[in-house]
Each structure stands twice: as structure tokens, then as C-alpha cells.
Amino acid sequence: MKNTVSTLLQQKQSGDKITMLTAYDYTTARIMDECGVNTILVGDSLGMVMLGYENTLPVTMEDMIHHTAAVTRGVENAFVVADMPFMSYQVSVEDAVRNAGRLMKEGGANAVKLEGGAEVCEQIAAIVNASVPVVAHLGLTPQSVNAFGGFKVQGKSYEKAKKLVEDALKIQEAGACAVVLEGIPAKVAELITSKLFIPTIGIGAGSGCDGQVLVYQDMLGLTTGHTPKFVKQYAALGEIMRQGIRDYISETKSGAFPAAEHTYTTDESIVSRLTEEYDQNENCHNDR
């Protein structure tokens, strides 16, 4: 069954946890969709895990449209959410609506996601009025990494926790259909979840949210270096890939690959005839 804004709301109401994973390409999205994930996020995290940037800030609208279109071609049932990249919605409401429309029209997204609270409510309302569903994003918002001074847990003090609650209520009033809560204390996320009628999707925000999201490279062991505390690794695909690549290199160099079962055949008489013909041509050439 196709996941929609309505089915996600029903999941919150029934206590059925919402599953979300990131994807950035057709093949991965198709596998996730076959497994039954509710939602796929084409995150601007692609800047780091796919394009090799230090953070999400260099990601462009063209990047997001390109990857979102690839994902949507691989999906039948998952609800696809596309991130609005840095500076695609902050400058003006008009920019926000135009770029959200591009992600839906050119990328095929079912919804867009943007970061921020009260300061982006005008953009949220305008995008929703243009018939584009909006997922909000509060807490540790990666596009604000420079303002935060790094990737740090948010909402640890009373004042900051209160602002998160107030921002959540405001973005809901503005028309957001869901909100991602990232990098905030579990009890704060649980409180926000209890105060909202729209679903909350947590990442580093505890189990009290209505759903969870992870970057698939993290949860499948494809990344190296620092692993955030909130990540659980469900498979070690990185090492499986490394071993497979090492085996390929070894067998290619030794001649074990390709073996007979990987090789096409033809009638020997054809090869004999061709060999004889070209040998004769070569001899004629040498005689000259």
C-alpha cells in the first residue's frame, strides 16, 4: 500500500512506529521499498556520503533534484521526502515555494523537508498552500553547523528545550505534516511528540518519537571514522564489499576469473576460418 501523509498520521494515531531511511539512488531505493520501509528521505546528507563534502552546505538544488529523481524511479510504495538544500528557502518565501515545487515536479518527491522553527513558518505555510507537503526539522539541524559551532546535542537547557517545544507547535500550526527531531534529549523529544498531532521522526532523539530515521550508510556499516552515539549498525556491508573487491582483484590477476562459466562460446569452425583468413592476409602483407 502506498504510504501517504494520511497513512503516516494514522500510524501515529495507532502507535505503529514509522520507519524512515535515507536513499540517494535508484537501486538502494528499490531494495528499501521492497523491504517495506514507510518513508525514504533523500537527504542533503548526500553531500557527505555520496559527494564527499565536509558537510551539507555545498549541496545544490540540482544535486537534490538529480538524486531525488533517481530514488523516485525505484519506489512504488514508500513516501519520498526530499531535503531542501542550504539557501534554497532561507532568502525568500518566493524562493522557497519555487524550489519546493521543483523537487516535486522535477524530482518526483511526495514532500519536502526544511530545517528551522519559528523563523521558517512563513515558508512552510506558503509551500503547503502551494499543495506541497512539508516535513519540518528541529534540534540539531546540519545546515546550521557553523552557527552551532559543530554537531552538538540541542535542547539540553530549560530555555532551549522550551524553544524546541514552542517551535514544534508553531511549525505544526504553519502546516507541516511531520517533523524530524534530531540530536535532542529523549525526554524532550517524548514531550514534543505528546504535544503534537503530527508524527515525529527521531534521529538521536530516543524511542519516544513516532518513528525513526537513519542514514543507510551508517546503519549498514558503509561509513568510516566517527560513528554517532545514536547509530546502530545492522550489517557490516563495508567489510563484505572490501573482501569482495579484494577477491576480484586477486582472481583477475591469477587468471581464475573469468572462468568457463563466465565465458561465451562459439563454433570452433568459425574461429578456425577467421584465423586462417587473417593469417593469409598477414602473409600477403609480409610478401609485399
Image (tube, grey):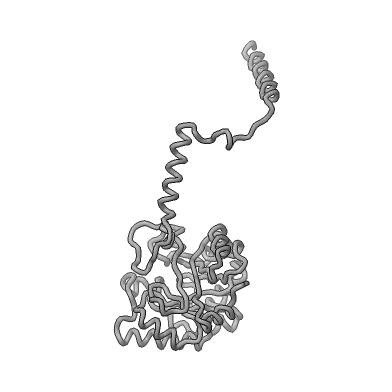
Quarter of the figure with residue 253: top left
Q: Quadrant of the N terminus?
A: bottom right
Residue 51 seen in this snapshot: yes
Q: 31 or 281: nearer the eye?
A: 31
Q: 226 or 50: nearer the eye?
A: 226
Does residue 82 sit above or below 15 in this rendering? above
Residue 124 seen in this snapshot: no
Quarter of the figure with residue 72: bottom right
Does residue 266 sit above or below 242 in this rendering? above
Q: Quadrant of the C terminus?
A: top right
Estimate the x, y position of residue 142 in percent, counting from the top left.
40, 71
Which residue sits at x=39%, y=84%? Answer: 164
Does residue 109 sit above or below 253 in this rendering? below
Estimate the x, y position of residue 77 in percent, counting from the top left.
60, 69
Estimate the x, y position of residue 40 in percent, counting from the top left.
53, 68
Q: Residue at the left extreme? A: 157
Estimate the x, y position of residue 200 in percent, counting from the top left.
46, 79
Q: Is residue 283 left or right of residue 241?
A: right
Does residue 221 sit above or below 264 in this rendering? below
Which residue sits at x=62%, y=66%? Answer: 76
Which residue sits at x=32%, y=73%? Answer: 152
Q: 30 or 284: nearer the eye?
A: 30
Which residue sits at x=57%, y=65%? Answer: 33
How many numbered marks are there?
A: 0
Quarter of the figure with residue 169: bottom left
